[in-house]
Amino acid sequence: MIKKDLLRKLPKIDELLKEDIVKDSLKDTMRTLVIDSLRASIDQYREYILEDEIQDFKKEDILSRFQEILETKKEPNLKGVINAVGVVIHTNLGRSILPEEAVKNVIEVTQNYNNLEYDLKKGERGSRYSHIEELIKKVTGAEAALVVNNNAAAVMLVLNTLCKDKEAIVSRGQLVEIGGSFRVPDVMVFSGAELVEVGTTNRTHLYDYENNINENTGVLLKVHTSNFKILGFTDDVPLEELVALGKEKSIPVIEDIGSGSLIDFSKYNFTYEPTVQESIKKGVDVVTFSGDKMLGGPQVGIIVGKKEFVDKMKKNQLTRALRIDKMILAALEGTMKYYLDEKEAVKKIPTLHMMLSSKDEHKKRAYKLKRKLKNKVGDFNFVVGEDYSMVGGGSMPIERIPTYVIKVKSNKYKPEELEVKLRKNKIPIIVRVANDEVIMDVRTMFDRDFDMVAETFAGL
Ligand SMILES: *Cc1c(COP(=O)(O)O)cnc(C)c1O
C-alpha cells in the first residue's frame, strides 16, 4: 500500500472506543489512561508508516499495541526491581531493603490513625520523636537522639545549631564528596558555618587543629571518608586525641560517621569499620549517620550524643523542615528493634544478612537458580562461577565479598543487548556485563525471584 492510503487507514480514537477490548479496559481503568494509550498506539503506527518500516497493518495490531502501552501506563513509575548486580547497598536501586517487621509497621500506621504525636498514657499532645529516642539511646549508648530526613540533613542541622557564624575545623583529608553530590564543604556553607581546612590531604596532626582554634571556633568536625581510602604515607588524628582537645578547649567534637554501622563488622572477617557505639564511648559529643546504609533501615539521618547539644537541635526551627514522616518512623522502629540482639539483626535485616551470609550459602542458591533456568531455556548457556559482591552506598569501598554468580552466554543476543532486555522487563532485572558475559550475583537476589527470572529468560 502507498503511504497516503496507509495513513488514511489509521483508525480514529472514537472508532477504537467501540471495540470490545477497549470497552473492557474502560471497566477498570481511568478513561484518560485508555485514551492516552490509544493515541500513543496510533501515533506509533503513524511513525512506522512515515519511516517506511511497515507496508501494511491490521486494526488488531493497533489494539494489541494499545494493550501493551496501557499495561505499562498502569504500572507505577517507582517499582520493585531485581538487583542481580551484587552491590548490596545500591544507591540507584534504593539502598537498603526493609526487614519484614519494618514493612509490617509501615502498613499498620499508614492504614490506620496512629499515635504519631499523641501521648496515649497522658491523653495529650506528644512528640513524634519520643517513639524512637529511647530505642536509639539503648542501642547506641548515647544520652540523647534525634532523627531527621537523611544524614546530609543531620550534618546541616548539627552545624547550624552549634556552629552558625562560627568556624568548623576539619581535616583536608576528610573534605569528601559522597554520591549524589553531597559535598562536605557545600553543606557547611548552607548551615552557616565557616569552614577552616587544616592539615594536608594525606596527613593531619593534632597541632593542625590546635593551632587553628580561636575564640570563634564552633566545633571540631571529623568526617568519615566512607567512599575512598587514602593509602601510603598517611596520618590522621585518633578520635580520642580530638575528643581530649575538644574537652580541654570546651569545643564540641562532631563526627559524621556516614554509614553508621551498629555492629562490629571485623568480627565477621570484614575490614574494621568504626561503630557508632564506639564513638559515643570515646566521648564524641555528637555523631551523625545514615539509616539506609549499613544500618539497613529507611532513609533517615540519626543524630546521637550529649543531651545538652541534642536538646538545642530539637529547639532549632530547621528541625521542623527536616522532620521525618510516620512511615519512616514506623520503618525505623521496626529495624532498630533487631539491634537489641545482634544475632537477630544479622539474621533479619536484609542488608546485614546479604553482607554477612556465607559464600557456601550462595553457592547452593546459584545452583538452585541454574536448575530453574535450565528447565526453561535453549538459547542460553548458564555457568555457575565465583566472583565478588560489593557493599556499596559509599561504604567499605575496598571490601570484596566472595560470592557465586551465574554467567550467561547467549548465541541470540550480545551481552549489552541482553542487559537491556532484562532491564526493560516488566519486573526489571538489573545485571552486570563483564568480560563479554551477563553476570547475575545471587547474593543480592531473593529466592522468591528465581521463578520469575527463569520465566523471563524462557520468554526471550
Ligand atoms: C552517605 C554519607 C552522607 C550522606 O548521607 P545521606 O543519608 O545519604 O544523606 C554524609 N556523610 C558521609 C560520611 C556519608 O558516608
Image (tube, rainbow, N blue to C red):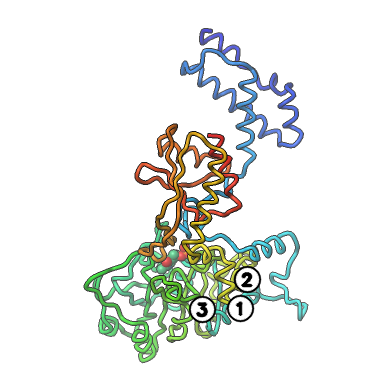
Mark 2, Cα crowd under 10 Å, few <14 / some 14-19 / many 20+, is many
Q: Which residue is mark 2?
A: 333
Q: Considering depth in this image, is 58 or 207 the residue closer to the camera?
A: 58
Mark 1, Cα crowd under 10 Å, few <14 / some 14-19 / many 20+, is some
Q: Is mark 2 within 8 Å of ligand 1?
A: no
Q: Which of the marked residues, 2 or 3, is nearer the chain's N terminus? A: 3
Q: Which residue is mark 1?
A: 135
Q: Is residue 366 above or below residue 276?
A: above
Q: Are marks 2 and 1 in contact (CB under 8 Å)?
A: yes
Q: CA distance from mark 2 to mark 1?
A: 8 Å
Q: Quadrant of ligand 1?
A: bottom left
Left or right, 419 with respect to 31, comes to left
| Place of residue 222 in the rendered image (x, y in percent of width and height, measured from the top left) | 37, 76
| Place of residue 218 in the rendered image (x, y in percent of width and height, measured from the top left) | 39, 80
- The kind of residue on which mark 3 rests is Val
Q: Which residue is mark 3?
A: 304
Q: CA distance from mark 2 to mark 3?
A: 16 Å
Please tell me whether mark 3 sits on a helix, a strand or a loop.
Answer: strand
Q: Considering depth in this image, is 459 or 235 the residue closer to the camera?
A: 459
